Amino acid sequence: MFLKRISLFNYKNFSEVNYDFDAKINCFVGKNGVGKTNVLDAIYHLANGKSYFNPLAVQNIKHGEEFFVIDGEFEKASRSEQILCSLKKGQKKILKRNGKPYEKFSDHIGFIPLVIISPSDSDLITEGSETRRKFIDNVISQLDRTYLQHLIHYQKILVQRNALLKYFALNHVFEKDTLSIYNEQLNQLGQAIFEKRQQFLSDFIPIFNQHHQEITNSNETVQLVYESHLFEGTTLQLLEENLAKDRALHYTSVGVHKDDLSFQIDGFPIKKFGSQGQQKSFLIALKLAQFEFVKKQSGEKPILLFDDIFDKLDESRVSKIVAMVNNDAFGQLFITDTHSERTESIVKTTHQSYKMFHF
């Protein structure tokens, strides 16, 4: 599977631009701020129905314009697949496959397997647990539609339970039977989500460790540790034990929506004890493991987006990554960099076909 072409209209800093891509390696080179990353984000947008960098969809419309359109043509299983994503101010975003609009964006998730590696991935280390949960959920959801539906349903029930807790507080009432209905639903969905996350991590962590050892020559010991309230009991038990706390806070304080993934180096939080280079290697190993996991589970090589991948990495670690490209483990690659000569000299060592796009 690969992206053959893309057209952007009023997307971020682009008025209108068209690109035809190589099936293997595509490099966008130029100074910072010229829009290289925006092209990668447009590709991500087609695969996921949303931006990787900008959660507010309307902010992806070019300043002063009323709409944006991203139109891409993929080749998948020897068939041409057109994916179009568009948004007009004041209206709902539209996502189409071969001219037919999706009723639910979730139906599109996983159709175009894709992994992005970006400097903004540092948020996985520096930000709160929600960012790391989203990483887990994104990987699993690309491969398991039932899991995605469980997540969506769980979130809806959670919102309803939180609204009920606020209603109780504002009106000085309490209806245990009504709350019990939500508790039962959260218990059932939460258990399914918890078990799937456990299963995923048991398969994922060995792949992550292998990639990290390849990048770092096995000089560092790193760990991914799953943290969940459900190791202490069922969701139902936890909700009952924390009822007084939830009523005081006006929201649900326990459950799989509070799960976290602890990133450690030599048994300590990498956020505090890891150097910039160690953190970068950790994140790249994490994303390469995501790529490998999705490839194994789906039987397809995901499109891989390298945004400024050589930033903060020493030469030996870059060469390790290039070696992975050289052994044909990857499918189609998109790379951004500020140094044209550096990028082209590295890409040439892969002995793969490539295209350079200068900004």
Image (tube, grey):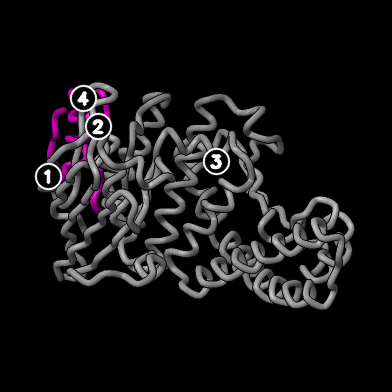
Residue 242: image x %, image y %? 86, 59
| Residue 24 in sight here | yes
**Quadrant of the snapshot with the C terminus:** top left
Q: What element carries label 1?
A: strand
Specify the amino acid type for callout 3: Leu
Between disc 1 and disc 4, whose residue precedes?
1
Residue that mark 3 sits on: 124
Between disc 1 and disc 3, whose residue precedes?
1
Q: How far apart are marks 1 and 3 (CA)?
A: 31 Å
The structure residue drawn at horizontal position 11% and vertical position 44%, both measured from the top left corner, is: 18
Between disc 4 and disc 2, whose residue precedes?
4
Residue 286: image x %, image y %? 49, 46
Residue projecting furthest to the front:
171
**Quadrant of the snapshot with the N terminus:** bottom left
35 left or right, relative to 267: left
Residue 276: image x %, image y %? 52, 25
Q: Does the residue at mark 2 contact the one at mark 1 (Cβ under 8 Å)?
A: no
Q: What element carries label 2?
A: loop
Specify the amino acid type for callout 4: Gly
Residue that mark 1 sits on: 19
Residue that mark 4 sits on: 30
Between disc 3 and disc 4, whose residue precedes?
4
